[in-house]
């Protein structure tokens, strides 16, 4: 299963870029984004930015991901793994 995840573009060098979420940085490609700019929020699938999104949409998705991550961490700790 593959997911598209929202990232904020923090660096661009031609078609190569860096996207970030909560301090986690990923190398991405921006071939499919017209005139990408630092600060753009994009949905990234399989390493490619596939569309621009609104900052509010990215933040909403990030918040949902943080909630899932927190629940998984708590479950993992309950099972004695942490």
Image (cartoon, rainbow, N blue to C red):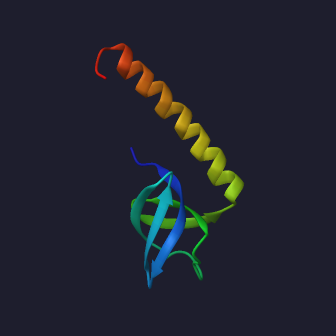
* Foreground of the two, 62 or 43: 62
Q: Compared with residue 14, is residue 44 higher up or lower down, i.e. above or below? A: above
Q: Check the image and name the residue furthest to the left.
A: 81
Number of marks drawn: 0
Tell me residue 32's x, y (percent): 51, 75
Q: Compared with residue 21, is residue 68 higher up or lower down, i.e. above or below? A: above
Q: Quadrant where the C terminus lies?
A: top left
Tell me residue 31's x, y (percent): 47, 78
Tell me residue 7's x, y (percent): 53, 59
Q: Check the image and name the residue furthest to the bottom.
A: 14
The residue drawn where x is 53% and y is 68% is 9
Q: Compared with residue 72, is residue 56 higher up or lower down, i.e. above or below? A: below
Q: Quadrant where the N terminus lies?
A: top left
The residue drawn where x is 43% and y is 26% is 72
Tell me residue 36's x, y (percent): 57, 78
Residue 27, by quadrant, is bottom left
The residue drawn where x is 61% and y is 69% is 40
């Amino acid at each position: 299963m593959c997911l598209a995840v929202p990232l904020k573009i923090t660096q661009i060098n031609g078609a190569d870029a860096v996207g970030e979420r909560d301090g986690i940085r990923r190398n991405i490609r921006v071939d499919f984004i017209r005139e990408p700019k630092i600060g753009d929020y994009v949905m990234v699938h399989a390493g490619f930015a596939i569309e621009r999104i609104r900052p509010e949409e990215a933040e909403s998705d990030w918040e949902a991901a943080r909630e899932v991550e927190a629940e998984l961490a708590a479950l993992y700790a309950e099972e004695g793994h942490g």
